[in-house]
Amino acid sequence: TDWKDRRLWVTVLPIVGITFPAAVQAVLWYRYRLPFGAMLAVLGLLFGEWVNRYFNFWGWTYFPVNFVFPSQFVPGALVLDVILMLGNSMQLTAVIGGLAYGLLFYPGNWPVIAPLHVPVEYNGMVMTLADLQG
C-alpha cells in the first residue's frame, strides 16, 4: 500500500484507466443512447481485478488480499456518466468528463488508503502502516 501514494500510480493509472470506460461509453451512447457505459465498464474491470487479486495473490501465494486492493475508478466513472447524461454531448464529456475522471482518481482512493497512513512505533522507529506493510 505504500507504493500507491507515489507519483506513478497517481499520474499513469487514470490515463490508462479511462480507455475502456470511454470506449464502452461511446458505443453504448452512439448505438443505444444509454449513459451508463463508463460505470458498466468500470464495474466489469473491478470485478476482474478482484478475481485476479483473489486467485493470483491469495490462491497461489497466500499474500494478504488487503495489501493488494484494486484502485477505485467508480467515482470518476459516475461523474463521466453524469456529465454525458446532463450535457448530452460527447465533446463536452471528453473534455470536462475526462478532466474530472483524472482529477477524482486520487481523492476517490484516499478513503481506502488513509487508514494506512497512521503513525505506529515499530522496533523503536516511527513509521506509517503503509511503510510497515511494504
Image: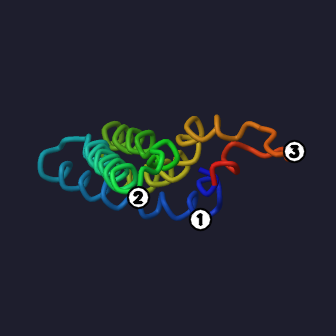
| Mark 3 vs 1: CB contact within 8 A | no
> Which quadrant, please, contains the C terminus?
bottom right
- Secondary structure of the residue carrying tag 2 is helix
Give the camera-side residue of 114 and 54: 54
Label 1 is placed on what type of residue? Leu
Q: Quadrant of residue 118?
A: top right
Total labels: the figure holds: 3
Q: Residues within 10 Å of mark 1 (few under 14, many from 20)?
A: few
Q: Which mark is residue 124?
A: 3
Q: Which residue is mark 2?
A: 17
Label 2 is placed on what type of residue? Gly
Q: Which residue is mark 1?
A: 8
Q: Residue at x 44, y 48 (%)?
A: 70
Q: CA distance from mark 3 to mark 2?
A: 40 Å
- Secondary structure of the residue carrying tag 3 is loop
Label 3 is placed on what type of residue? Gly
N-terminal of the pair, mark 3 or mark 2, is 2
Task: Say which of marks 3 and 1 sits in front.
Answer: 3
Q: Which residue, as the protein is rendered here, is positioned at the far right?
A: 124
Q: Residues within 10 Å of mark 3 (few under 14, many from 20)?
A: few
Q: CA distance from mark 3 to mark 1?
A: 31 Å
Task: Say which of marks 2 and 1 sits in front.
Answer: 1
Indicate the position of residue 75 as horizontal and vertical percent values.
45, 39
- Secondary structure of the residue carrying tag 1 is helix
* Left or right for 10, reference 79: right
Indicate the position of residue 99 as horizontal and vertical percent values.
50, 53
Q: CA distance from mark 2 to mark 1?
A: 13 Å
N-terminal of the pair, mark 2 or mark 1, is 1
* Left or right for 133, reference 41: right
Indicate the position of residue 74 as horizontal and vertical percent values.
40, 41
